[in-house]
Image (cartoon, rainbow, N blue to C red):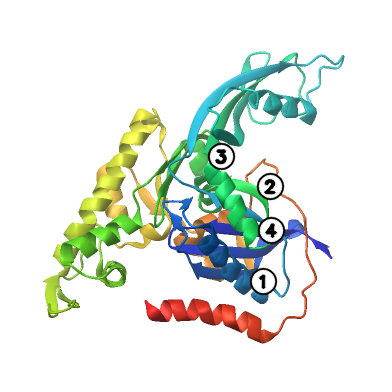
Amino acid sequence: MKKDILVGLDLGTTKVCAVIAEKIPDQNRIDVLGFGVAPSEGLHKGLVANIGKTAEAIKSAMAIASNRAGFEVTVVNVGVAGEHITSIRHRNYVTINRDEKEITKEDLDRLEADVRTIRIPSDRQILHIIPEEFSIDHQSGIENPIGMSGSRLEASNHVVLASIPAMENIRKSVERAGYQVQDYILQPIASSASVLEESEKDLGVALIDIGGGTTDIAIYHKKAIKHTRVIGVAGNQVTNDIRESLGVMTDEAERLKKEYGYASENAIIKDEDILIKGVGARGNTKIPISLLTQIISLRMKELFTLVDNELRSAGFKSKIKAGIVLTGGGSLLRGVTELAEEVFGLPTRIGVPQELGAGLSNEIESPEFATVAGLIRGIPGGKSSEYQVLIKKQKEKSSNQLGKIIKKVQDFFNEL
């Protein structure tokens, strides 16, 4: 059976998300057929720290998604993050020698092949080559040169580099779980595909995806990606600050953050006391929400200041006319847009996955699933924007086997 099936796998520090979807070309929509989440214990700040545990999380998330979809898949699009990610800008050209001088896709392939010959560190590999714009015979600002005529085709490229060992560990984890990698996609690029509007990309926008272990940045201007960066400060640091400051367990700190936390004191509706569970001989205590907010706000302000410095050092702060878009689980903190506007001095909104169709699409219409929603779209203009996957026929499996996997996930959450 052959269909336009799209599979995304988001390997996060706190959770692994899997989505199986079908592209409906004539209706320009993506229907989510299966969706699964499993706790992640094998990753740290976007990097695989334990291949076995990561593979088990992938198996669990994919089993849930496959069961809901009613079939299995063999290949997946995998999100990549981590502080090992770097990017460079590279300009190159090729000459058009054929008589009619018409530019074809073959010429674009030659441009890409030429970029792949540039010298990069021996422990790095090229993850993406994304053209920002093209020039033909020194006429710049061309988005798509195919079909046009000229003698010299130039391109300004955004080249993303990744650590070879880090990528190998991801590949090994996916293969140990029983799947093959169709494509690796940088997580901020995936998130951008699901939450940004074309008008924002044209005017200039900065996407900030706040996850558990990393915060991913993508800057767009004139419809092209201009800069990407991954910062190792994110939601888990906020949780750890609460844990250390209040002397509570990690799960209690996470609960306090989600239930009572604010990123800005100005956003507090009512400053009431909240109960803090005691540990050991120390009894329960009460603290005002404003104190919890001060702990959270300090770390979030530090994070936004780091991002603001990145925007300035990259030379794009003045070009972000459409403002800031926050997404990821960390953007669910109340008052986060107010704090962002205070630090960046720019209008800010929360980015939610857009243009999803039927099926289980409503289950991933949340900022925390922005990356996995983008992974099923692929890179606009890239090789994974449309591809077909052969679906394996669903084999007869005992419900007990699947039940064991689902029960394992449920037991994990019950023990927290």
Give the mark toward the camera: 1 or 2.
1
Of circles 2 and 3, the one toward us is: 3
Tell me the residue that label 2 is attached to: 384
Q: Earlier in the sequence, mark 2 or mark 3?
A: 3
Q: In this figure, which residue is indicated by the disc labeled 1?
A: 66
> In which quarter of the view is residue 244 placed?
bottom left
Q: Nearer the viewer, residue 287 or 167?
A: 167
At label 1, counting other C-alpha atoms closer than 10 Å, the crowd grade (few under 14, some 14-19, many 20 or more) is: many
Identify the amino acid type marked 2.
Ser
Kindly identify the residue that appears in the image at 77 percent across and 19 percent down.
149
Residue on which disc 4 sits: 6
**Camera sees residue 251:** yes
Specify which label sits upstream in the sequence, 3 or 4. Answer: 4
CA gap, disc 2 and disc 4: 9 Å
Which quadrant would the C terminus be assigned to in this image?
bottom left
Discs 2, 4 touching: Cβ within 8 Å: no
Which residue: 27% across, 53% down? Answer: 338
Q: Is residue 198 visible?
A: no
Residue at figure coordinates x 56%, y 67% from the top left: 56
Q: Residues within 10 Å of mark 4 (few under 14, many from 20)?
A: many
Q: Is residue 221 left or right of residue 183?
A: left
Q: Which residue is mark 3?
A: 164
Identified by mark 3, the residue type is: Ile
